[in-house]
Amino acid sequence: MMEIGLNHYLILSTILFAIGLVGVMRRKNLLLLFFATEILLNSVNIAFAAISHYYGDLTGQMFAFFVIAIAASEVAVGLGLLIVWYKRHGNIDLDSLASMKG
Amino acid sequence: MEKYLYIALFAPLVSSLFSALFTATPKKTFTGIIASLLIFSAFVSSSILLTHILGGGEPIHVEMMTWMATGDLYIPFGFVVDEISVTMMMVVTLVSTVVHIYSIGYMDHDKGFNRFFSYLSAFVFSMMILVMSDNYAGLFIGWEGVGLCSWLLIGFWFHKESATWAANEAFIMNRIADLGMLVGLFLIYWNTGTLQYEGSFAAFAHLDTTTLSWIGIFLFIGAMGKSAQFPLHTWLADAMEGPTPVSALIHAATMVTAGVYLVVRSNELYSLIPHVGLFIASLGAFVAIFAASMALVNRDMKRVIAYSTLSQLGYMFAAAGLGAYWVALFHLMAHAFFKALLFLGAGNVMHAMHDELDPFKMGGLKKVMKWTYIMMTFASVALAGLFPLAGFFSKDTILEAAFAEHHFVIYSVLLFTAGLTAFYSFRLTALIFEGEERYKLFGIHPHEAYKYMLVAMSPLLILAIIAGAFRTTFFGMVEEILGAMEYHIHSHVTLWIMTIGTQVFVILAIMYAYKKYNNAKITVPDGTSAMENSFMYKLLLNQYYIPYAYEKYIVVPYREMSEVFWTHVDLKIVDASVDGIAGIIYNTGDRTSAMQSGNLSTMLKWMVAGLLGMLSLAVVFGLAVRYSDEILAILSGLGV
Amino acid sequence: MVDHILSILIFFPVVAALFGVIVHKDSIRAYGIAVSVIEFALSLWLWFAFDGQSSGMQFMESIPLIPAFGINYTLGVDGISVFIIILSTFVTLIGIASLGEIKNLKNMIITLLVLQMTMSGVFAALDAIIFYVFWELSLVPMLYIIGAWGGPLRIYASIKFFLYTFAGSLVMLVGMLFMAYFYNQATGEWSFAILDWYRLILPENLQLWLFVAFFLGFAIKVPMFPFHTWLPYAHGQAPTIGSVILAAILLKMGTYAFIRFSLPLFPDASVFFMYPIAVIAIIMVIYTAMVAYGQKDIKQVIAYSSISHMGIIIIGTFALNVEGISGSVFLMLGHGVVAGALFFLVGVIYDRRHTKIMSEFGGLAHSMPRYATIFGVMMMASVGMPLTINFVGEFLSLLGFFKQSQILTLLAGVGIIVGAIYMLTAYKKLFFGEITNEENRNLPDINKRELVALIPLTFLAIWLGVYPKPVLDPINTSVESIVQLMHDKAQTAEAKRRIPSPLSQMTIPVSSIEEAH
Amino acid sequence: MFEAIAFYLFAFLTIAMFYIVVTTSQALYALSALAAGMIFISAFFFILNADFLGAIQIIVYTGAVMALYAFGMMFFDTTREVKEKKGNKFIIVGMSALAAALVVAIFAAPMLSTNIVALYPSSADIGNTQEVGMVLFTKYLIPFELAAVMLLVAMVAGIVLAGKKMDNSITLEDDTNEKVLS
Amino acid sequence: MLDPVNISLESLNLTTLAPMLIPIVGALLILVMDTIKGGLDKSLYVVISMLFMGIDLAALLSASDMFSVAGTMMGAFDVMLIDGLAILAQLIIVGASLLFIPLALTGKRFHEFSYPEFFALFLFMMSGFQFMVATDNLILIFVGLETASLALYTLIALHNRDKSFEAAVKYFTMGALAAGFFSFGSMIFYALTGSVEINQIATVLAANNYADIGYVLIGTVFMLASLGFKVSLVPFHTWTPDVYEGASAAMAGYMSIVPKIAGFIVTMRLFEFLIHSHVVWLEYVLYGVVVVTMTAANMWALVQTDVKRMLAYSSISHAGFVMAAVMIGTTQANTALFLYWILFSFTNLGSFSMLWISRQKSLPDHQSSDHSYNKFAGMIHTAPVAATIMTLFMLSLAGVPPFALFWGKLYMIGSAVSAGYTVLALIMALNSAIAGYYYLKLVVYMLMKDPVAGVSGDTYTRNATLSLKTVIGIAAVGTIFAFIAINPLIEFITSFVYNSGY
């Protein structure tokens, strides 16, 4: 228990990922929804770093690095989209995105 | 000789096609004349062929061309003129010549004059094919061809509902029998490898009795239809809706006897299976009395004669079934003459009475229609079988044959029927020609038929009288081919007693008929007399309720079943299940497309759900793999 | 040129159709007739050049199309297919020649020419995939014909027609792929050539499965009970020309395919399924005849009667002997002529009265005697009157099957009775009796344009009934080789027995005669 | 021992922070909690000797990303309480429960792969940043460059989307009289 | 201290990078040009894009020549992997892009084409997809995927109307979730094997004899979820219809082809070794997913009222069809995958282009979507040629021979049959039959219904220009005469796929 192994990190990562999932499912505000997706990516990063550490291999860190880059890019595009939407509709409520269905 | 064969065969066809050219035009008398001439030429050719055969000439056999040939099957258009077919050809061409000429007068005022001759000649052609073919398939062509012409001619007055109904009935009933015949043909082919008479007859000798019996039975089923034997007899009476010359030619003299011809032609088969023959004979005897009984009370002149025909066909089958093929054929010939005469006479009466058919509405016509009276009386006498007319010789021989073969039941039935025959024949004559002139009540002014019609009928009259004289010649001719034998009653005394007894019985019947119907008290029945209300009378008048039963238990259920099959089975089950499958697919799509609510949150949930679903599967599988040993242990512990 | 006559036959109409697009619509009828006359002449030439004594495929052409997957553009005809091709060109010709004044005539003629291509293609194809291509492609023009010129329910009918057939043939396609796969397993090469497949002897259980797969495709096309319900709709809604071609040619694709594929490829399975299929065929014969009797619409009567007749064709096919198969092939032609003519005839009154309900008519024989005559001839041909074309086929089919089962043949034979019942009844309703509906009193009799279509058909119906030899002989030759092939390929003793070799003489009389002496 | 305490402490903190992110109805709380969570995550990186990553995490996330979000939040005026319609709680709760169960099931068992050979082994005597640089500019040069392109894409995309030109949609303009190219 | 690293330039094999770099250069050039002189006409950018795509194509062709001589090439520190799959997929990507980009030259003006950035982003996206297929390194795949996706979201949104924003947001959000799945999946594989290269992963797993099968499955699940989103497998497909509807028809057509082929390549690389190692679980799950995808998407397509949405569902169904090839995993199946997709590209691009040329700017009366079925009613009367061509595409999609897609289906079902997947083959066949209905529905509307009042022939070609017509012509010719090209295609693809070890 006190010896922190890889599994601890993995479990932590998974828990955080699950929290992210809950957020993704639960959030109706797009901005807050994007927060949840950040949680997803971050949770994975912990795991990558941990594996990298325990295997003594740098690839995991590399992956985490790129994940961070991706997360940053996503934010830019995502916010851009939100801005456009907000300009037109004055809200970023997810439920307002329902003109197409069936 | 072959050219005469071809003339005899194709002259009617030419005649038919020629008349057909004018079907769309108004009446042209010359079509009738030319048709009659062509048929007459066929008659002449047949006569020449007859002389050839009578003179001991070889049977003529020609093979015109191949019809169907595939696999081992080979069917040519082959024709044979031998003793049997030449007899039939004579009967057919003679009667049809007479009927053609007669029809020129009879159909005088009909719009469909030209059409009529076309049909009539087509019928003759079909009949010629039927009797001249050298194989069963060719016979079947003629068989169906006469059926077609019969349909056309019964329904000739197609504006009449009853006529067209009767035409269809006749056709369909015949089809039922034709199926039997087809099956017979199939049996012959697969057991003998050929449908030629020669080849199959040769092979019959080597087949086992069961097979032969089946062949015999199925062929006879075919014959039953064409010859209107019970239970397929109802169409014949209804067929009287057609013009009377048609009834004379088709439904008395020729087509209906095709069944007899078939049995006679297949004598080599039937002589191998006497038990089937006995059945045929018994059925024939039954039909003889059965039909005669219906003739007793019927109030339709033509129907009475039709029942009489039926009854006489029963005689023929009785003879053929008992192996007396030549007798059957002889009776067929004789019957053709006097029955055609009887019908044509009836036609005259109808013409005179403006298509009135109820003899009770006639009476005393002998004054205006003397020649018709004479002809019909002679014909009736011949029918009744009085010496020395044709009917005596042929019918009496049948009785003798039955007696000689020790089939006493058949004999008695036939004997009794002879009495009935005499009774109804003279009931009819008496009602029509004797007694009060009841037609006056209905304002009808009867007149005798055209002269040439009467002249045309005269050969029949003569033959009805003298045909009996040909008995010996005929016997000599067909002896070889039909394996014919004279029937000898063991003692002359018995023979004499029988003959005279029969004659007396018949004469008594005639006298009773005259007594009963030749008096002034006869009125048009109105359904009030005690006799008319008796059970028997009603039974007979309604033809034993057989047509009624057919209608109620076959026709109506068939129609209803068809409706049900269509509206319920086809539309509601078969089609609906096809549409149902499509509908299920469509509706599933329709309902589940709600999954696509367009809401992003739902979409995300679906993604997560998909992930979790697969994860659960993976975990279950992973655990199962990891603990597979334990699971196996548990399962084996449970005894699985 | 004669070496490529089949390709020319197939592609000439479609090329002509493409050029037809630029023809002005006033002249399109003449153009269509000209093209179809040439096509018909080509097909007659095919007949002329055809060697009736040879049992093999003739005018073979082969161009590699997808050699990597064993698909080649292979064509060829034998006695079985050559006449159906001729019939198809003939029906197209008279169909175009007798087209009435319809809207979008140009589209119709172009569509018909495309349809002609697919029809020739199906019957000339000797490669399963090429066969399938034309088979499926034929649906499209027909879909358009029904859907664009049909009655009020035309869209439903056309979609039903298309999808039903499409679904069935996709299953068949899977079967074909399996067949090719087995060929690949056996020889190491891919091939979809039918003649190659003929050489393949499959184990019986595989045969059964493949037979079923092919059967679905064919049975729906034929159409066999209970897959037949698209047909009444298709016929009921289709314009006259559509019904004519559908009945005369398209339905024959199914029965033809049975003979081309199912029998020679799966002889053991054919024997195995003979009885079930015969029972289905008998249901088709009797049941649909009864349904036909219950109809109120004359066209539906004829539509159901088609199904009934197809039952007899199936029976003949599954007789598995030369007599039966020859008969069924001949009956395909016969039914093509007769059903085609009957649909033409229905079209005639429909053009005049715009109704097909029988109770609207009655007594037409008074006002339209010539029409009644031709109808009568065709009706008699339809009920199988001897000396008409249908009799030969029906007789031989039933005769053939009689060898396999007497009882079932007897039941199938009931078809000639029930067939007469609905046909005569319908005829009576249309033509007999007094004229009850005043509108019928002055209907013009059949006109020249209609006679153009009907006279040749009537002539054919009788000519081939009286003298079927020129057609029956080549059919017989080819059928014999197919039956021989089946006999040789059959593995089970039962199948060997059921499929007699046409080369051996009929044994029964000979042996029994010898025994007797 | 220190490591364990640190792990549990930060694990608790991150979970708590992220829990707040997904549950709070105050956007501002969520933003703050997210930022805090990210910083706590960087702590793990430091624990795990991934110093470079930790630095990047703080700079990129808490510096750049959070700044962007903060800007966005101001723009969207979501500082007030976020009203979220309550969806079907049952589904979410159910799925979360399932997820939790799966997590336990999955990671209850240890991973068996022990014989992993490090492809790019980290060595104790070199600084983490140097190591990372070494790998990044050899092996992962191409992904790195592509990441640069990706950022460029994101930048262009952001600019274009948020640009003024988007305000008037040509797509929706009616241009019936427009010259037709053909 | 670190030793200096000496790397020879040859060992980097930089030619492997050429096909991806060319579009990047093109994109940069466009950006630079715009900076120097704004307001240039879109046709210029279209031509420049095409030019670079042409060069790209040439580079790919030379790469394919090299491949056929030298086999699989690795490059750039073994990150790049140029094998047959990579080349084929890139050919499809570049080819489809080449056909797509002229669709920008519309008769009407649309918002997105007024941006030079549109073309730059487009080229970036292409390059992203090219990277994605030309590597087996999960990191590069991920980065390539995101590059392409981010560009794609923007391209959709640039159409600039509510529906396209909605589409972009939906796509983006779900894409972010899928990215999370992808990284989690990669993490598990990394945890299992210490590597993020698929080859290496396979080797290590095989060496361990799949001892951690449970974890492998978990990783697989996440990967499947993520890639399933990309290639739109049920239940990860939900974005597809909405995004297709929201995007311009041209974009939708493009999306139905290019991102998916990239997804399929990754799927093949990742899953086929698992299937070949008899991970039966994956096989079963894929089987289920494939069947559900084909069938359910077909059913939903049945009930659509808008042609574009119908085509969206239909492309989901087609994706399921193709996914079956991945599951079957034989060389023939993989060949079938490419063959199918090439043929599908022609047909689908053609049909979406037909929608594109009939695009009106404002919605017609009583219609809630751009391309409702009703719009096409009676088209044969008003625009016969267009109707005929559209019919052609529909028939091809339905798999009516001899049009393009029939051959794809034939070969695909054939590969299923050859691999013993009888039931699957039947399901595929029956699904094609179901699909027939909705394609036919459009045909029925066009050919058999009467035109809606007030619709004239140019309704359907209002957006048409020569370049659009050319694209449609190419697609039509490709669809009709596909049968000529099938054999060379099969041989070409088979040699490439086979030599890549698939």
Image: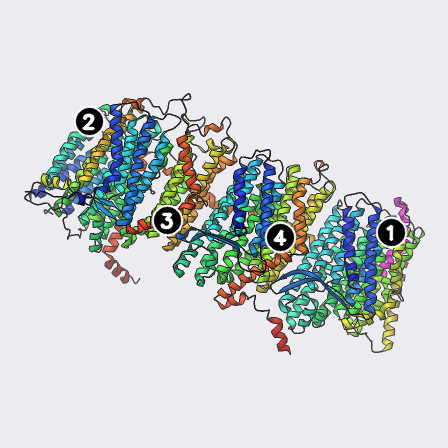
Q: Which of C61 and D27 lies nearest the eye of the viewer?
A: C61
The percent coordinates of residue E319 (x first, y second) are 36, 43
Question: Distance between the Cα atoms at labels 3 and 2?
Answer: 55 Å
- Disc 1: CA contacts within 10 A as few (<14), some (14-19) or many (>=20): many
* Closer to viewer: mark 4 or mark 1: 4
Say which chain tag 3 marks: E
Callout in the foreground (4, 2): 4
As drawn, the label of residue D70 is 2
Kind of residue indicated by mark 1: Asn
Q: What amino acid is at disc 2?
A: Ala
Q: Marks 3 and 2: which is nearer the front? A: 3
Residue receiving disc 4: C334
Quadrant that contains the N terminus of chain E: top left
Image-based side of D116 in relation to C354, left or right: left
- Marks 3/4 same chain: no
Say what amino acid the circle numbered 3 marks. Ile
Magenta stretch holds residue C111: no
The residue singled out by tag 1 in the image is B348
Q: Residue B131: x percent and y percent?
A: 75, 62
Residue extent of the magenta highlight: B423-450
Colour scheme in use = rainbow
Same subunit, tags 1 and 3: no
What kind of residue is marked 4?
Answer: Gly
**Residue, far right:** B367
Residue wearing tag 3: E490
Between the C-alphas of marks 2 and 1, the distance is 120 Å
Query: Can residue B299 be seen in the rendering of this structure?
Result: no
Q: CA distance from mark 1 to mark 3?
A: 89 Å
Mark 4 and mark 2: span between their CA atoms? 85 Å
Badge 2 marks a residue whose secondary structure is helix
Inspect this view and state whether residue A89 appears. Answer: yes
